Image (cartoon, grey):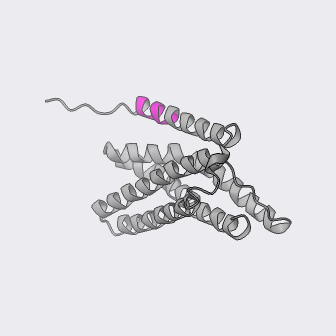
């Protein structure tokens, strides 16, 4: 039986197309979609769940980094798959929360508002960058292209970790001022 290698160009094109579709959907959800008032006061646990999933993703990423530095590839792989799972569950929960409740406005003023908006803006920017990077890094790993995997993971890891941590920070700001 002949084994077929995944075409990197086609796979990367699919990753970019999937990322663009997901980002477009999220932008529509955030800036065009109007949430129904019938869900006000329901499913209010979702923002805390989102923060928990982001935090768990950050922990799994750091533990995965530890394992690869120790040369334990199977443990590293498991941690990265776990981080991906947490991030994927976060994305589903985030979409459900925004579909039901819409956007949460930050009521703080002055310096705290500037800090919050700066963190939020960087979080959003890097989350857009992270999606195709994470998918590409996984593609190279899962297809055994470890040289390319390591090369891109040097960029993917800190960006993914930053997005996971700042997701928790954004929740903490909103918890302190808006919820």
Residue drawn at (59%, 50%) of the image? 127
> Which is more toward the observer, 90 or 145?
90
Q: Is residue 126 above or below residue 112?
A: above
Q: Position of residue 31 (x, y in %)?
A: 70, 40
Name the outermost residue toward the right: 110
Name the outermost residue toward the left: 1
**Position of residue 77 in the picture relative to residue 165 (left or right):** left
Q: Is residue 53 above or below residue 40?
A: below
Q: Is residue 78 above or below residue 26?
A: below
Residue drawn at (51%, 52%) of the image? 93
Q: Position of residue 88 (x, y in %)?
A: 46, 50
**Position of residue 119 in the picture relative to residue 26 (left or right):** right
Q: Which residues are magenta?
A: 10-16
Is 3 a magenta residue?
no
Q: Quadrant of the N terminus?
A: top left
**Position of residue 99 in the picture relative to residue 104 (left or right):** left
Q: Quadrant of the C terminus?
A: bottom right
Toward which corner of the image does residue 73 lie, by quadrant? bottom left
Residue drawn at (50%, 46%) of the image? 133
Which secondary structure class fits the magenta region best? helix
């Amino acid at each position: 039986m002949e084994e077929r290698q995944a075409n990197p160009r086609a796979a990367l094109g699919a990753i970019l197309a999937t990322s663009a579709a997901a980002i477009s959907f999220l932008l529509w959800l955030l800036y065009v979609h109007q949430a129904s008032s019938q869900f006000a006061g329901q499913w209010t646990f979702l923002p805390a769940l989102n923060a928990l999933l982001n935090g768990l993703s950050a922990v799994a990423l750091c533990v995965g980094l530890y394992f690869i530095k120790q040369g334990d590839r199977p443990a590293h792989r498991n941690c990265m798959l776990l981080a991906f799972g947490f991030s994927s569950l976060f994305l589903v929960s985030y979409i459900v929360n925004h579909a039901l409740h819409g956007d949460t406005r930050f009521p703080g003023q002055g310096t705290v508002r500037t800090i919050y908006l700066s963190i939020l803006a960087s979080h959003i920017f890097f989350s857009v960058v992270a999606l195709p990077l994470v998918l590409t890094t996984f593609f190279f790993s899962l297809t055994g292209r470890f040289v390319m995997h390591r090369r891109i993971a040097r960029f993917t890891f800190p960006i993914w970790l930053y997005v996971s941590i700042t997701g928790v920070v954004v929740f903490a700001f909103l918890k302190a001022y808006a919820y």
